[in-house]
Amino acid sequence: MAKIVVDVMLKPEILDPQGNAVASALPRLGFSFAKSVRQGKRFEIEVEGEPTAAQLAEVEKAAEVLLSNPVIENFVVRVEK
Amino acid sequence: MRVGVITFPGTLDDRDAARAVVAGGSEAVSLWHADADLKSVDAVILPGGFSYGDYLRCGAISRFAPVMSLVIEAAGKGMPVLGICNGFQVLCESHLLPGALTRNSDLHFLCRDQEIEIVNNTTPWTTSYKAEEKIVIPLKNGEGSFQCDDKTLAELEGEGRVIARYVGHNPNGSRNLIAGITNARGNVVGLMPHPEHAIDELTGPSAQGLGFFTSILNAMVK
């Protein structure tokens, strides 16, 4: 079964208070690797069989209309085996 | 004057909004999210709350409720629409208003009495106020930070479409201290703080929110 994955992230210029909160929590726990953190959303969509081009086009449309808000967010659609 | 108040699943402030409509001198008409019927109302209020549990994004699901397609159509023809808090979020998600409301910059849910300045008193919802009048009404939200791109911000400011600004400290990181905006036509208004909770001094911090509800009566009678 293939999975269509939609990753939604706030646009780089939009303030991400949740990501900032994670970034400031990490060093408190001894993790010193992070220069910055951005938090987003991931949608996993199961389809029967291999996703068709038409299905992917529909997912793109749904991502634009519902899954993301294009005013503040970008999205990427990909297929995960 | 018939002013509709929409109830979505998860709406909290519909009763206070209806009470404020009545206090302002109009008839309050309950509208249900699933109805494809505006019941001949002259104006519509989208009240505050957590419609559809704020799932996905605040207001994102409500935008597709059957009643919203009628609201979007009527707003396009000039019907006055006021979205308060979650209602403001729904109006942005519906693209009736530009921009978006995002998580408060300090991540806290805020609930406090907030001073705002009425910047534009020419919309059907704000004519009862004097220009630059300052009022204190409750602010209560987790995602009230108004964000938009620079071009949109310049348009809003240049066209006088910011209707209210926070006074003093920026409570939530909103650009240019924006508490409320209107569309290009001026009939659709979104406001983050809650005038419907400030219509008498027994239950609110002031009675200074009542002006939004007397304004709409005046706008309609004219």
Image: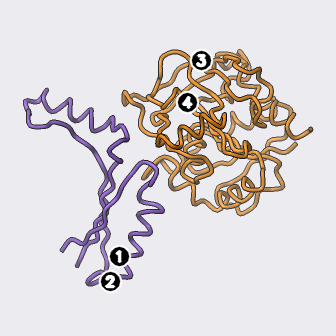
Say which mark, if any, is on residue A52: 2
Circles 2 and 1 on the same subunit: yes
Dot in front, 4 or 1 = 4
What element does badge 2 sit on? loop
Circles 4 and 2 on the same subunit: no
Residue name at image x 35 percent, y 76 percent: A56
Q: Mark 1 points at which residue?
A: A56
* Amino acid type shown at disc 3: Glu
Label 4 with label 3: CB-CB less than 8 Å: no
Label 1 with label 3: CB-CB less than 8 Å: no
Q: In which image quadrant can residue B120 be found?
A: top right
Say which mark, if any, is on residue B115: 3
Q: In which image quadrant can residue A36 be found?
A: top left
Up the image or down, B182 lies above or below B171; here it is below
* Amino acid type shown at disc 1: Leu
Residue B186 appears at what percent x and percent y? 72, 42
Residue name at image x 76 percent, y 45 percent: B80
Q: In which image quadrant can residue B188 be found?
A: top right
Label 2 with label 1: CB-CB less than 8 Å: yes
Badge 1 crowding class, 10 Å Cα cut-off, few under 14, some 14 to 19, many 20 or more, is some
Residue B62 appears at what percent x and percent y? 56, 54
Look at the image and give the colour of chain B: orange
